[in-house]
Amino acid sequence: FIMDPEDSLSLDHGIPAPETYLPGSPLWFWWLMAAGIFLLLILASFLYRAFRKKTLPPLLPPPHDFYAAAALRLRELEAGCDSRPLSEMAADCSLTIRAYLADSLSEPALYETVEEFKARQVELPREAETLLTSLNDVKYARSAIDPARAREFIDHSKQCLETIHTAQNLKA
């Protein structure tokens, strides 16, 4: 007897389908299955967070000490007192004080004329205005090498820098 392969799927052997012998799944089983999957997802999330590489917040550069940089620059200027013209020394002292104001207080002093600076000033000590005015008078005048006066400018610049720095710290 040769059987047709297409007919073999429709043969009736008198045996019922296997699903009739299996019990149905109760509703609590499906709720338990859903709760188990939910708990597995929570566990996977917890493990992922626990074992992933922790990214550190970006490191901020340490705050720059503008006062120390300005004080160092004034100390460096002392070495040139005996060999540099007074106008150059006055210009460097003025630039150091103005750069400190620009960096530490966000002052536009570095880019202003002395007149603009004086007209706008209400918060800085009077000493800064007086020093910058006297330095301005010397840096644009003819000059020669004058070590004593150059040291005097540097000393006044150091005192002014200290006064501004102290006043700034008192406000903070």
Image (spheres, rainbow, N blue to C red):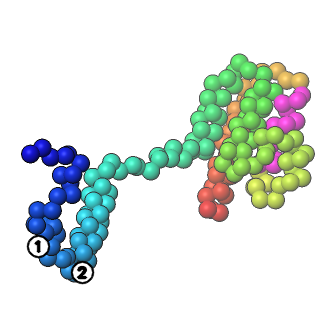
Depicted 23 relative to depicted 153: above or below: below
Task: Residue 166: give x, y in percent of width and height.
Answer: 63, 55
Residue pointed to by mark 2: 27
Foreground: 21 or 126?
Answer: 21
Residue pointed to by mark 1: 21
* Left/right of residue 79 with respect to residue 28 in the rendered view: right
Secondary structure predominantly adopted by residues drawn in magenta: helix
Residue positioned 88% across, 36% down in the render = 137
Foreground: 38 or 146?
Answer: 38
Q: Amino acid at mark 1?
A: Tyr
Check if residue 172 falls in the magenta segment: no
- Res 123 quadrant in image: bottom right
Task: Residue 89: give x, y in percent of width and height.
Answer: 75, 28
Residues marked 2 and 1 touching at CB (< 8 Å):
no
Residue positioned 56% across, 44% down in the render = 64
- Res 66 quadrant in image: top right
Which label sits on residue 80? none
Magenta stretch bounds: 128-141
* SS state under label 1: loop
Q: Residues within 10 Å of mark 2 (few under 14, many from 20)?
A: few
Q: Amino acid at mark 2?
A: Leu
* SS state under label 2: helix
Foreground: 105 or 20?
Answer: 20
Task: Residue 5: give x, y in percent of width and height.
Answer: 20, 46
Depicted 147 relative to depicted 121: above or below: above
